[in-house]
Amino acid sequence: MWKFRFSILLVLVLSLIYCNPGEIDYNQEVKIEPTSDENYGDVAQLLKDTFRIDIKKISVDMVYFPESFYVNCETEIVFTMFKDDTKPIIHLQPVLADQRLVDSILLNGESLDAYNRSDVDFIEIDGPNQKVLEFQRILNTGIEHRLKISYRKNLTNNYYMFATEVSDLYGNGNETIFPTINRPGELALHKLRFRVSGDMKFRLIGSGLVQKIENDDYQEWTLDTEREMASYTVMFVLLPEDDTLYEEKAIDGVDVRIMAFKNDASIDTAFSTLASWLPELRTNLGPFPMKRGLSIMLMGSGGGMEYYGGTISSLWALEHEIFHMYYACSTVPATYRDSWLDEAVNEWYENSALPNFNSINDDYSSNIVSGRSPIGIGFDGRAYNEGAQILEHIAVNMGSRQAMIDFLKYVHENYSFKPFTTIEFVQYLKDYSGLDYEDNFKKWLFSGETVNKTSSTQNYNIKKHQVNFIPPQSIIDKYENLNKGVVK
């Protein structure tokens, strides 16, 4: 928890300003509707019927006006249709929130009107957080289509920051910034261009290849993921240069870049942690998955969130988030409900090295997977504890912790960037070891309890996903009169 001596009012205001979108209560009991796979039939077909398009490339050109607290965005997505005679949809929260923010929409060169429901409709596909733009045109399959949208994204007016704010636990993705399909199995090439207006100097770190561009009119950078990847794993952080520290270092052949607020978390401590952690992961799981290395926005407290080749994390959660480079960001779940496996693997790796870590009981049953719709968002918090114990059951049957690690390395080497479901993971296990866990998994994950009962241990693990993106008190004091137009 943050240890700054805020006034009560300031704490309340900042907690609303800087927390991830969605007004999440991390201590709430999560109620899950009783469902089963039989309700959904062919899951692959359901995904195609629901999301309808396969995005090939996402290009975003952004001009950030820090002192006016908004970003002008010009975006283009290139996609194909999954199904004949189906209207394309896209997630894009700024447009959903306010059509007045839209400057223009072009679909295959045709101008569409955001106010005209015969051009663009707003529909809900799976719960309140899955509202989408539905374009009222029937597009052909087998060919590429282009959608261009220009719009404004408004930012909070309490600090000069423009950054991703993703929570896979609750299904918040980068649709708050650019058009995408918010599901883990939707892989696309991303190319982003950032320009910053004004005299204040900024720093940028992010996923993939980030390059500073010489430009007399703007501060400019480009970000290229260089491969298709899930949109919710794209990270970038733009912060004032005067408020931050930045260091680069190669560790075990991995280029590591760390940015932190001044008078906050120790960059040296982070490098020291990675000096042993990165070699261990390479030995056990294989070479670091991202060729451009690792970008870290280091926070003074709270938890963290993993991204492709990057993380926004505290020192406490840093090892956990770096492990996710292997399971979550490169070994990719097909749907959010399959994301339980990422946390289960991560927690198992940590806990199985401790004495007296127990495997799941044979008679355990839950709906950790089936309690979530394949087209829903977020995953079940029981993934951390019970999920890790399920993997320990497999490890015991395989004969050792190392045997399980070897299997996880096999899965990573053979199925990275090939999204797979929970049941497909079971098949990989059978192919590798001969162990048949299909009946066990159906009992452990696809039946049983319909309520996710929180526990102190589970809440402790969930806090690893609470990113406290709050500057230290010294920087807050510097900008305390920001709304009055005064900066100390």
Image (cartoon, grey):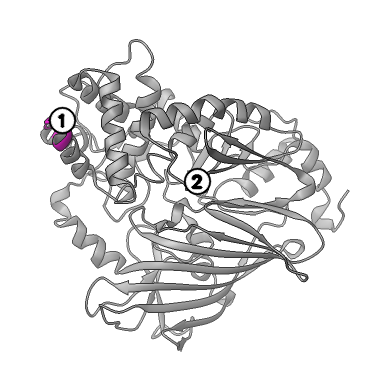
Relative side of 158 to 293, left or right: right
- The residue that label 1 is drawn on is 433
Which SS class for mark 2?
Answer: loop
The answer to whether residue 167 is above or below residue 79 is: above
- The residue that label 2 is drawn on is 309
User: Three-letter amino acid code at disc 1?
Assistant: Ser
* Cβ atoms under marks 1 and 2 closer than 8 Å: no
x 36%, y 10%: residue: 355
x 19%, y 22%: residue: 398
Relative side of 275 to 39, left or right: right
Q: Earlier in the sequence, mark 1 or mark 2?
A: 2
The N terminus, quarter of image: top right
Residue 280 in the image, given as x and y percentages of width and height: 44, 26
Relative side of 358 to 69, left or right: left
Find out whether residue 436 is within the magenta segment: yes
Q: Is residue 266 visible?
A: no
Residue 73 in the image, given as x and y percentages of width and height: 59, 71
Question: Alpha carbon of mark 1 to alpha carbon of mark 2: how far?
Answer: 30 Å
x 80%, y 58%: residue: 200
Residue 382 in the image, given as x and y percentages of width and height: 33, 32
Highlighted magenta segment, given as a residue range? 431-437
- Picture quarter containing residue 248? top right
